[in-house]
Image (cartoon, grey):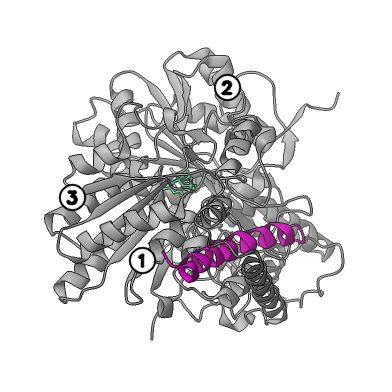
Amino acid sequence: MKPRTLRYCQAIHEALDLSLARDPSVYVMGLGVPDPKGVFETTLGLAEKFGSQRVLDMPASENGMTGIAIGSALAGMRPVLVHQRLDFAILAMDQMVNQAAKWCYMFGGQQGVPLVVRMIVGRGWGQGSQHAQSLQSWFAHVPGLKVIMPATPHDAKGLLIAAIEDNNPVISIEHRWLFNIEGPVPEGHYREPIGQARVIRPGRDLTIVAVSHMTIESLRAAEVLAEQGIEAEVVDLRTVRPLDRATILQSIAKTSRLVAVDTGWPSCGVSAEIVALAAEGAWSALKAPPVRVTLADCSSPSTPALARRFFPRVHDIVNAGRRVVGLEPLTERAPAAGDPPADVPDNDFRGPF
Amino acid sequence: MSSERLLRLYREMYLIRRTEEVIADLYKEQEMRCPVHLCIGQEASPVGVCQELEPADVAFSTHRSHGHYLAKGGSLLALMGELYGRQTGCSAGNGGSMHLIDRAAGFMGATPILGATMALATGAAFATSMRQETRVTVAFFGDAAIEEGVFYESANFAVLKRLPLVLVCENNGLSTCSPLSVRQPPTRTICDMARGLGMTAVSGDGNDVLAVSQLARQAIDIARGGGGPVLIELPTYRWREHCGPGFDFDLGYRHPDELAAWQERCPMQRLVRHMEKTGVADAAALKRCEAEVQQEIDAAVRFARESPYPDESLLLAHEYMP
Ligand SMILES: Cc1ncc(C[n+]2csc(CCOP(=O)(O)OP(=O)(O)O)c2C)c(N)n1
């Protein structure tokens, strides 16, 4: 029998639905959570099902409301905060970084903060400088936080359930371009372990370590590389903190070559961390300098004209793969009629967010 | 008010209305590839306030800024260029609709992170007072923005330093699809809160451009005269969807009857009725002005479409000021 499939946004919805049903201390709060768009469908109908006490809108007060969520967690609740853009969550850095992340440690391990903060990363359609930031490395820098970035519907559900059941603050970073991707999702309750990467495609010639939407693009790149006789192993990071060093190092030990692909910026980013890990832990195995594929090192431009060079794409990953195995880069074929423009995930995407 | 002045108010509101309508029509062509927050129905606030400002006065705005930008004298050509992502745009294509600027016109910048520009406006007013200039700074924002902590923090400082600041809160009762009732307590008004912080606060009909300009006149005089910051609350209504070119009554969070009632209070029709009542209406002059505005807009769209896109070599060009 064919496995049941869901879209990424439906998988998140199912995780919230199940968690709300299983545990009365879980509640979901954020701007627009109960509205008719339901945060890109992820919270649709939940307020009707579980009541407006447990699935609720909030004032536009991200910083205060994050503190309120943390306070409620200290008093027995399991809040899930939702931000339509990661950029809005930045207003709450004090509460996330100074309070939630530190609480367990600075009070000698007495109490954790079971908080989940979902935040969505925008891309394209002119999202611009304040609606497209992918700041996972900020959060992953901070001891006390856990950071998940599921790439598949299966992991979106399993990791979110695990995050809600975790006794620590978990930042869930969801890329907007994943929301319509469909994939198999088991029915019912299951947890994917936080802190475990997954070899999502085996290969012998090089290792691509990727995260979030870049995992999907890396799988596409691996197919292109396979047509050229290059077998790439793709490791889907899934969790950025704690980092699954063993799985990454194992893969590099096997392939001896590394490409690190991130949705964020290069400087002090996740890709830098992966390369550092390879340098520290797989030095003697490496047969070529690792290559990183990231955003260009500038703010996100709104114009579609700069999207192709700003955002990393399949073509860039393919060429990075060729480089680590010692092949010349390929020039990209000119965009053909019917190709989706570089600023949308597919031809169906109509913006605006 | 003189009939020329009234005609000018009409022209400015019409410019904003028609620009937004043209954007809405052309948006379907998928060539303006950025989110747009249209202000159709809310034109009285930007026009009423900005017409009372001196040229040296400055303004900041938010995600819904086309009206403020135009009313402050921002270039229509550069607006269209920006929406089309062209190099001739007011932000060289980097910004899109949510990041408008026209420094020559005193439009200091609009950004979409709620509440942020209130603090920036407070800072601009602070600079004015440190430099002993007579300039007034205006910040336009919506009813949700005052829920951000930065509102309290900015207001507190502006009152403390008696800054020449005018805060204009366009209260359309909505934050995307969320009504005020799920965000703020019903028995406390926005003006109450501002007064509680020590500011002068006034409220008036946000769809009556004459009422708005009168409130703005008083507020600007107080702020410029050293009386400290003033908040103006302007109840109004957004006709179209929160973001994008269409209507959103299919979503069910508000009823089309509401729109019909507010359309009765259309800022432009009300001004025309006022002109008729006071005997200064000149149908031919209005028609002429509408035709001129339409030509300007058509020219701006043409200009934008004919403008080049920024070259890919410019990607990193603007990250730092040399
Ligand atoms: C800090 C922050 N949180 C959330 C958002 C998303 N957002 C954009 S516009 C908007 C509604 C704002 O409502 P209001 O301030 O009343 O202005 P209006 O849209 O009604 O003009 C929201 C929630 C944002 N831009 N910034």
Q: Do the residues labelled 1 and 2 touch (CB within 8 Å)?
A: no
Per the rendered image, the range of residues in magenta is B1-29
Disc 3 element: helix
Residue in the picture at 62% in, 80% down:
B310
- Choose between B72 and B24: the one closer to the eye: B72
Q: Earlier in the sequence, mark 1 or mark 3?
A: 1
Q: Is residue B14 magenta?
A: yes
Q: Where is A264 relative to A235, above or below?
A: below
Residue B156 bears which disc, if any?
Answer: 3
**The quarter of the displayed image where residue A5 is located:** top right
In the rendered image, residues at marks 1 and 2 fall on the same chain: no
Q: Residue A218: tell me if it is visible.
A: yes
* Pointer 2 residue: A46
Distance between mark 2 and mark 3 Cα atoms: 39 Å
Mark 2 residue type: Leu
* Pointer 1 residue: B52
In the rendered image, residues at marks 2 and 3 fall on the same chain: no
Q: Is the magenta stretch mostly helix, strand or loop?
A: helix
Q: Where is A168 relative to B311, above or below?
A: above
Query: Label 1 is found on which chain of the structure?
Result: B
Mark 1 residue type: Glu
